[in-house]
Image (tube, rainbow, N blue to C red):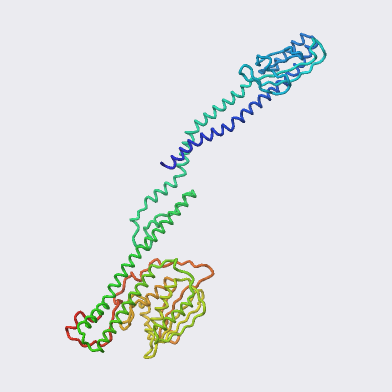
């Protein structure tokens, strides 16, 4: 049943009940007011006839019939529609005109009123007034009593008429209230019906899967329009927010699926060559159990190296996938200085042949994702330790962290050959590496990813001395107010295309043992 129909039915049921209840409250008040009006008229009639009644009583007491007749006519003229009864002090009825009880015993003897008396089932309102007369005569004692009478049923009949009118109004109010309620409900629910039609027109099939710009999505096609009704506007805003969250979750789900597919594709493609190398070396060991100890040790070392490279590749791909899927609620205030100290200590453990120098204050806070910042620092220091040698000496790496205006500047310097200016952007691409590099080509990609996620920037330049390589990372610092973090909409560090020539290649520089043709099955040089 429609809401407007429900409202109309409720109005048709409730309004008559309210009218009847109001009538029940008003009827006693109306009856009381009618009786007060009747009593006021009785008092007015008594005041009007009282002079004539006094004269009539005085004439009767003096025995003057003609005067008495004249006073009776005056009393009759003043009585109008009320009943008047006049009795001498001895009970002799001097005048009885108009409607009044037939039984004389029903008239009250004590002055006062008006009071209600009953005669033969009829109710009467009677006002009793003591009348004083002048002189003596006729044995009357010089006084009398005046009764002014009105039928008591007049107020009751008027109250009954009011009751009938209340019931009539209640009967008429039911259909009228239903029509008015239906019209008002239709008008009030018109914005809700428009909102319902707009929501019904939305089709999830029109939402582009994996879209990043939001064009054509439900949230973009459904905008909260002001209707003038606060409740409908709140519902429209809530619906728009729900759709935007749905589209965001759908986009993130599609991105997660694309990331998973890209991870699988990249892992299968990039691991093909090292896996073939592993298989070849295993075949060599299996085919030549009598291989000399030196050559066997060389093959085993090559197997361990391939295993390490495969493990590093899978770890780096997993880190890239984590960065592609991280959410805003994972970010928080982080002391970057502590992370720098921890990263330097770990780098010294991993690369005992390198020399690390750290210059960082006790506390430099940024708003970031702590695991991501650890990934950034580990890859920066590992890259510098591997590529930072100048000649035959150990690699020397200098790490500095300092506040820089409204942000934080992290620099990592080494004494290696550096990067040519034309290659300084390309090194951040996925799987970009030099032929002689032992890495997977993902280290600086992870650095660029984390810098972008933290609303920062990274670049490669030359240290102030003019030789070596410097990597600068700028990140926004934590201010007095909580920062508003907006992650990049397009995160495709793992799912984006890989330029030609930037694939994971392995070039072995070791001398291989000279093996018979039968021992080279399946072994091909890496390209």
Give the percent coordinates (x, y) of residue 177: 49, 36
Quadrant of res 142: top right
Please identify the residue farthest to the right as the structure is shown. Answer: 135
Q: Nearer the viewer, residue 483 or 152?
A: 152
- Residue 233 at least partly seen: yes
Q: Nearer the viewer, residue 150 or 497?
A: 150
Q: How many marks?
A: 0
The residue that appears at 17% across and 86% down in the rendered structure is 516
User: Which quadrant of the figure contains the C terminus?
Assistant: bottom left
**Residue 94 percent across, percent down from the top left:** 73, 12
What residue sits 20% from the left and 79% below the top? 522
For image coordinates 43% across by 74% down, the residue present is: 373
Query: Could you tell whether 158 is left or right of 447 in the image?
Result: right
Q: Residue at x 59, y 26 (%)?
A: 159
Q: Position of residue 361 (x, y in %)?
A: 51, 80
Of the pair 90 and 187, the residue shown nearer to us: 90
| Residue sitting farthest toward the front | 289
- In-front residue for pair 266/342: 342
Quadrant that contains the N terminus: top left
Q: Position of residue 363 (x, y in %)?
A: 51, 77
Is residue 527 in view from this perspective? Answer: no
């Amino acid at each position: 049943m429609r809401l407007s129909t429900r409202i109309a039915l409720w109005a048709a049921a409730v309004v008559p009940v309210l009218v009847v209840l109001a009538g029940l409250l008003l009827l006693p008040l109306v009856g009381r007011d009618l009786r007060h009006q009747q009593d006021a008229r009785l008092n007015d009639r008594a005041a009007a006839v009282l002079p004539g009644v006094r004269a009539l009583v005085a004439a009767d007491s003096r025995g003057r019939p003609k005067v008495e007749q004249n006073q009776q006519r005056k009393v009759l003229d003043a009585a109008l529609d009320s009943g008047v009864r006049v009795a001498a002090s001895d009970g002799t009825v001097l005048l009885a005109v108009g409607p009044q009880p037939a039984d004389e015993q029903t008239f009250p003897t004590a002055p006062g009123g008006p009071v209600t008396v009953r005669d033969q089932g009829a109710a009467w309102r009677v006002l009793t007034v003591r009348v004083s007369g002048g002189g003596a005569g006729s044995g009357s004692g010089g006084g009398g009593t005046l009764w002014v009478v009105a039928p008591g049923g007049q107020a009751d009949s008027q109250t009954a008429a009011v009751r009938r009118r209340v019931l009539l109004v209640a009967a008429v109010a039911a259909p009228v209230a239903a029509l008015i309620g239906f019209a008002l409900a239709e008008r009030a629910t018109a914005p809700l019906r428009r909102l319902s039609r707009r929501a019904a027109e939305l089709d999830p099939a029109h939402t582009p899967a994996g879209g990043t710009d939001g064009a054509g999505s439900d949230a973009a096609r459904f905008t909260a329009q002001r209707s003038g009704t606060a409740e409908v506007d709140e519902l429209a805003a809530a619906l728009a927010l729900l759709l935007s969250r749905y589209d965001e979750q759908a986009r993130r789900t599609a991105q997660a699926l694309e990331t998973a597919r890209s991870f699988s594709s990249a892992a299968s493609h990039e691991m093909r060559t090292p896996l073939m190398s592993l298989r070849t070396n295993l075949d060599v060991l299996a085919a030549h159990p009598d291989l000399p100890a030196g050559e066997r040790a060389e093959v085993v070392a090559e197997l361990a190296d391939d295993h390490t490279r495969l493990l590093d590749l899978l770890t780096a791909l997993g880190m890239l996938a984590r960065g592609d899927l991280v959410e805003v609620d994972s970010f928080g205030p982080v002391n970057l200085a502590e992370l720098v100290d921890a990263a330097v200590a770990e780098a010294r453990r991993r690369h005992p042949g390198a020399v690390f120098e750290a210059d960082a204050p006790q506390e430099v806070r940024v708003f970031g994702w702590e695991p991501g910042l650890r990934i950034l620092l580990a890859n920066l220091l590992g890259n510098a330790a591997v590529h930072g040698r100048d000649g035959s000496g150990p690699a020397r790496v200098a790490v500095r962290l300092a506040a820089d205006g409204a942000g934080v500047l992290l620099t990592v310097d080494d004494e290696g050959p550096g990067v040519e200016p034309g290659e300084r952007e390309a090194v951040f691409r996925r799987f970009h590496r030099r032929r002689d590099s032992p890495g997977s080509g993902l280290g600086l990609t992870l650095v660029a990813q984390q810098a972008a996620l933290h609303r920062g920037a990274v670049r490669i330049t030359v240290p102030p001395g003019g030789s070596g390589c410097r990597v600068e990372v700028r990140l926004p610092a934590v201010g007095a107010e909580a920062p508003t973090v907006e992650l990049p909409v397009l995160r495709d560090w793992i799912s984006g295309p890989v330029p030609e020539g930037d694939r994971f290649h392995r070039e072995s520089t070791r001398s291989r043992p000279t093996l018979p043709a039968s021992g080279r099955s399946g072994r091909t040089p890496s390209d």
